[in-house]
Image (spheres, rainbow, N blue to C red):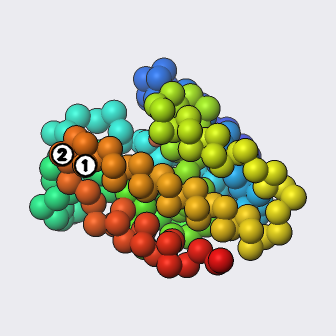
Amino acid sequence: MFDEKKIDDLRQRLAGEMSEFRFRHTLGVEKEAVRLGELYAPDKIPLLRAAALLHDITKENTFEKQLQLCDELGIMLKGSEKSSPKTLHAITGAAVIERDFPEFADPELVSAVRWHTTGKENMSICDKIIYLADYIEENRKFEDCVSLRQYFWQEDICKMARPDRLAHLSRTLVISFDMTIRSLEKEGATIDENTTKARLYLVRNIPQ
Ligand SMILES: [Fe+2]
């Protein structure tokens, strides 16, 4: 489904459709998703590449355009979603992939795009990889992103057994959700309930 030629064509198409800033970030997410994929899901690397390339496909749309897309795509928004432009691009992005990029609309890919901003309860390995790659890719300069990147990569993950690797990924995600919740609280913004649920699910399921 995700052969190299198709992914290369997609990358080229997106280069012409995004700002330079967004495209650089997108390539950073792709690179990071491949690194994480090598550790956690080597058989999913092509899917992860395509998901990374498409994850911010609607991010540069205005809020009005996002709402218009929801209208066109028959998306019913809940109250809190309407007031959160950041969350909205993940919802519209997933739906736009199904409509405009059907050749990439694998359910695992669509899910990774849908949940890359808020996270959710019981995330798949691809959901987790795209979420984390978006947070820690090399172009991210925010303090939280830099410190989370250092936290994750300071360990010699290659040498860890799989259960320890997965626990390390879960711990890293818990820290990221804590950071997100703290910064939303500071801004006085609404915390998406999926973020709280994602955090709680991980805390309950990290092997001791
Ligand atoms: Fe992103």
Q: Is residue 54 left or right of residue 197?
A: right
Task: State the residue lying farthest toward the top.
Answer: 20
Residue extending furthest toward the front: 208
Q: Residue flagged by tag 2: what amino acid is it?
A: Gly
For residue 193, the mark is none
* Quadrant (top left, top right, bottom left, bottom right) of the N terminus: bottom right
Horizontal and vertical percent position of residue 194: 34, 66
Q: Position of residue 46 (x, y in %)?
A: 70, 53
Tell me the amino acid under the disc marked 1. Glu
Can residue 103 be spotted in the picture?
no
For label 2, the residue is: 188
Q: Secondary structure at mark 1?
A: helix
x 42%, y 68%: residue: 198
Q: Taking the image as drawn, is residue 55 in sight? A: yes
Q: Along the horizontal axis of the image, is 142 left or right of 4?
A: left
Q: Which residue is mark 1?
A: 185
Q: Residue at x 48, y 32 (%)?
A: 143
Foreground pick, 132 / 203: 203
